[in-house]
Each structure stands twice: as structure tokens, then as C-alpha cells.
Image (spheres, rainbow, N blue to C red):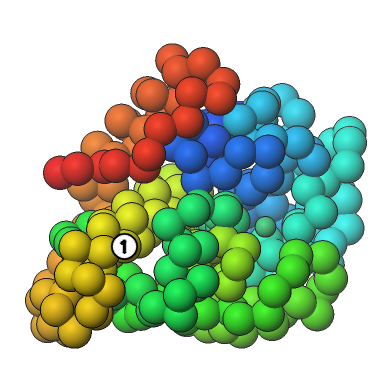
Amino acid sequence: MNDIDALRQDVATANRILERFGLSHAFGHASARIPGTNTFLLPTRRSPGLAEASDLLVIDTEGRLVSGDGEPNSEFWIHARMYAAREDVGGVVHAHPPACVCLTGIGEPHRVVHNQGAIFAGGVPEYSRIGLIRTRELGDLLAGVIGAGRAAMMRGHGITTAFADVRSATVAACYLEESAALQLRMLSAAGGDAARLREYTREESLALADQITGSVAGRAWEYLSGVARVAPLGSSRPAQLQP
Ligand SMILES: [Zn+2]
């Protein structure tokens, strides 16, 4: 398998992971930059659980379809403008995970409350405008909110993660949903009093911020992709990547 075929396989697997682990159902999408170019691989307009390596489209950062058959997902501008804004980004995930949406619904920022959540030690800013990202301008706005960071919460909508490669962006999206779910449970157990959460200090978080690289991320990807290969479509389960 050559590099581009391997990348296509990764993108298809990443999309299937989003559906299998309940981060998205009919909607949501993962993409990967074709290295050294201003183009990226994105599925056609259907559930990420139905993504196929052979059906991916090639789109450029201006939103133009370069190759492939079919219509892209309508929020392709998220990917196009993220890659335009950041040369270091090689993988982007956009999904609608419920716990993250719940946090935005109660105006609660993401807090680091467990080890995997510490990869977001730099904070997860919120894109507060509701609705879908269906224009170049809104794509630029979202990319601006993410800035040099790793992710954004999108109020009433979902999340977007931006990493060096699609595997990391996908594992990180799962971690963010797991983190948000734990935060909600802790908040509930504490009677809604956020002051009672034993949030990690900045120093504690930073010490674990690299848990998205190397063998840790590799092991997470191995597990997620393994489940995505064998689980039947629609058998969504809570994203719980317990260490
Ligand atoms: Zn969306």
C-alpha cells in the first residue's frame, strides 16, 4: 500500500470511529491533509460510519473539488479553512459529541479533570455562534477561535480538533468527549457546584499534555480502529477510553 492509499485508509477508519464511539451519527467528518499540499481528503456527504477509502474526495483550501465523485459534506469549510490557517495541521475532526454539547449548553468551560483531558491543558475555547459552518467566512471564524490551539467547543453543535495527523485528531476528539462526560458526572455528583471539582492545576495538566503522542496515542488508535473494524454500523457506545 502506498502512502496515499494508507492515508485514505486512515481517513475512512477515523470517520468510522466517530460513528462507532458515539461522537456522531448521521453527521460529522474527519479529514487529512495530503502532505505537502493545500488539499485534503474528506468523505462524501453521508454518515461518517459509511466512509470508504475509495470514495473520498480531494478538496483544496479554497473549497474547490479537485478530484473524486460526489458531493462533499456541507461543512467542508471547517476543514478547508483550518488547513489554510495552519500549515502544521494535517488532520481535522468535526463531530457532534453529546457531552461536549452539554457543557456548552450550561456555559461550563472544559476543565481538566482526568489524565487524558490534560492534552487540552492549553484550554478549549468556545465558538459561540450557533448553526452550521457552511461558508468560507464561518470557516475562517472557527479557525480563528482555535488559533494555535488543539480544539474548539461549538455551542449547541459539537467540537473541532486540529492536530498534526488524522489519527491524533481522532484520538483527541475521543479524549475530549470522554473528558466532558466525566466532567458532567463530577459536576452532577457535586450538586452542580463547579468549585468542588478537583480540576488539575496548570502545572499538573502541562505535565501530561503530551499524552497524545507516541505509544500512548498509538495504543489508543489501535484500539479505536480495531473496534471500528469489527463493530456493526450503529452499535455506538460511549467513548470511554479508560487507561
Ligand atoms: Zn457540524
Return the residue at label 1.
Answer: 184
Asked where in the image residue 227 lies, by quadrant, the reply is top left
Where residue 144 appears, as percent x and y from the top left, is 61, 84
Q: Residue at x 33, y 55 (%)?
A: 181
Q: Residues within 10 Å of mark 1 (few under 14, many from 20)?
A: many
Q: Residue at x 51, y 63 (%)?
A: 101
On screen, residue 134 above or below 28: below
Q: Would you say 60 lies left or right of 83 here?
A: right
Asked where in the image residue 136 lies, by quadrant, the reply is bottom right
On screen, residue 56 above or below 76: above
On screen, residue 105 above or below 236: below
Give the quadrant of the C terminus.
top left
Where residue 90 appears, as percent x and y from the top left, is 54, 58
Where residue 138 appears, as percent x and y from the top left, is 76, 77
Q: Residue at x 64, y 48 (%)?
A: 28
On the question of residue 220 being in view, the answer is yes
**Which secondary structure lies at badge 1?**
helix
Amino acid type for the residue under numbered disc 1: Leu
Give the quadrant of the N terminus.
top right
